[in-house]
């Protein structure tokens, strides 16, 4: 890393990798120096599209490239443990797409590896880095609505997705929960921390993945969160946080909102809107900027997306899967998906 520039490698060449790279190259302090795919042809096509100097046909070559400071891992989540682990062991810092891994065991292995090698590691939970979401959290933390009593959030896609689609493929960690449900769960835990108990129900596909899942999370404080995800019905992607003295509503797109409304007892509603200077509401630039800020400051994890918080979310996702009966190939029959939750 030079004094002014953070050098990036991109691992994988799918849609999210393209979206991230497009936003990354607009940041003045970022330089994308290499891309890797299991297919050299795919890597070269991606490199030509974004003007990236080097293209590799295997992940190891990217991990070993000493001109790279940090690697963005954008593979399907079933490969996150392998891909991110390869980069961390080679001395690269890592930003890894969500869901962080397939389960908490894999997540804990990556965190331990990063800490062993003194490398920066962060889940690409862009919602946590969004300026308007950060403003919402600040209001809640400052007591704007009193003590949080309930959180509600949903994320569903209409589909229909055929059995061959990755969202229904158990080999790729398919289902609504890990791909979409990670957002409502992460939103609830952003505001309340890790729940003390989890109840859940789901509708499963013939392949054994969840088509839609609803979960009720509870905390020892008495707070509750109702979260829902689906790949068989498009939802409003709305969220609401109710406290003892008011409420905050996000009417649409809670994980990348353009506005939210604060209702406080005895006052007129207040609307908070996104600053146009922050870029498009679907921009991934904020998580990239947070990685570069942390690296420049010599930090090995981000205070916005702390590793302990990522592990806590993975524990909740595991607990939900345990309740609804979803297991993926490679998870041993006796693997504990119902590990004890850490009370908030």
Image (tube, rainbow, N blue to C red):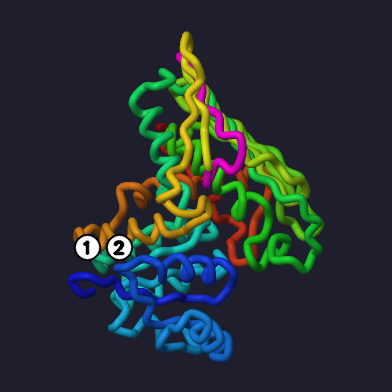
Asked whether 279 or 94 is in front, the reply is 279
Residue 88 in view: no
Q: Residue at x 60, y 32 (%)?
A: 226
Residue 321 rendering spot, x and y as whole percentages:
62, 48
What is the number of callouts on the image?
Answer: 2
Q: Quadrant of residue 152?
A: top right
Q: Which region is colored magenta?
A: 244-257
> Does residue 65 appear to the left or right of 182 in the view shown?
left
Magenta-colored stretch includes residue 255: yes
Q: Residue 199 shows which numbered tag? A: none
Give above or below for 270 relative to 179.
above
Q: CA distance from mark 2 to mark 1?
A: 6 Å
Q: Main secondary structure of the magenta part?
A: loop
Residue 28, x across and y down, in percent: 32, 68
Relative to 231, does residue 273 appear above or below in the rendering? above
Q: Secondary structure at mark 1?
A: helix
Mark 2 vs 1: CB contact within 8 A: yes
Q: Which residue is mark 2?
A: 292
Q: Relative to 271, say whether 186 is above or below.
A: below
Q: Is residue 110 visible?
A: yes
Quadrant of the image occupied by residue 30: bottom left
Q: Is residue 47 left or right of residue 7?
A: right
Residue 167, x across and y down, in percent: 69, 61
Residue 185, relative to residue 140: is it above or below? below
x then y, percent, for residue 17: 52, 70
Q: Residue at x 74, y 66 (%)?
A: 165
Q: Give the labeled residue for mark 1.
A: 296
């Amino acid at each position: 890393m030079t004094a002014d520039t953070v050098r990036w490698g991109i691992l994988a060449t799918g849609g999210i990798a393209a979206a991230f790279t497009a936003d990354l190259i607009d940041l003045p302090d970022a330089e994308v120096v290499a891309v890797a795919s299991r297919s050299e042809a795919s890597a070269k096509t991606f490199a030509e599209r974004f003007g990236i100097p080097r293209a590799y046909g295997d992940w190891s070559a990217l991990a070993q490239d000493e001109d790279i400071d940090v690697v963005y891992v954008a593979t399907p989540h079933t490969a996150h443990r392998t891909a991110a682990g390869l980069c961390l062991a080679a001395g690269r810092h890592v930003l890894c797409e969500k869901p962080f891994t397939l389960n908490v065991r894999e997540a804990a292995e990556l965190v331990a590896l990063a800490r062993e090698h003194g490398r920066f590691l962060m889940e690409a939970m862009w919602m946590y880095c969004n300026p308007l979401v950060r403003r919402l959290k600040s209001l809640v933390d400052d007591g704007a609505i009193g003590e949080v009593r309930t959180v509600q959030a949903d994320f569903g896609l209409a589909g229909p997705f055929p059995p061959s689609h990755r969202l229904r493929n158990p080999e790729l960690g398919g289902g609504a929960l890990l791909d979409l449900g990670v957002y409502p769960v992460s939103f609830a835990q952003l505001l309340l921390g890790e729940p003390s108990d989890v109840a859940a129900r789901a509708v499963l596909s013939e392949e054994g993945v969840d088509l839609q899942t609803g979960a009720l999370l509870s905390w020892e404080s008495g707070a509750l969160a109702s979260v829902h995800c689906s790949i068989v019905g498009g939802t409003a992607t709305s969220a609401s946080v109710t406290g003892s003295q008011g409420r905050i509503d996000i009417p649409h797109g809670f994980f990348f909102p353009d506005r939210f409304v604060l209702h406080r007892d005895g006052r007129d509603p207040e609307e908070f809107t996104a600053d146009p200077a922050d870029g498009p509401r679907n921009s991934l630039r904020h998580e990239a900027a947070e990685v570069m800020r942390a690296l420049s400051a010599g930090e090995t994890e981000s205070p916005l997306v702390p590793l302990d918080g990522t592990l806590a979310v993975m524990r909740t996702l595991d607990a939900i899967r345990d309740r609804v009966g979803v297991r993926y190939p490679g998870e041993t029959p006796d693997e504990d998906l119902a590990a004890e939750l850490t009370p908030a």
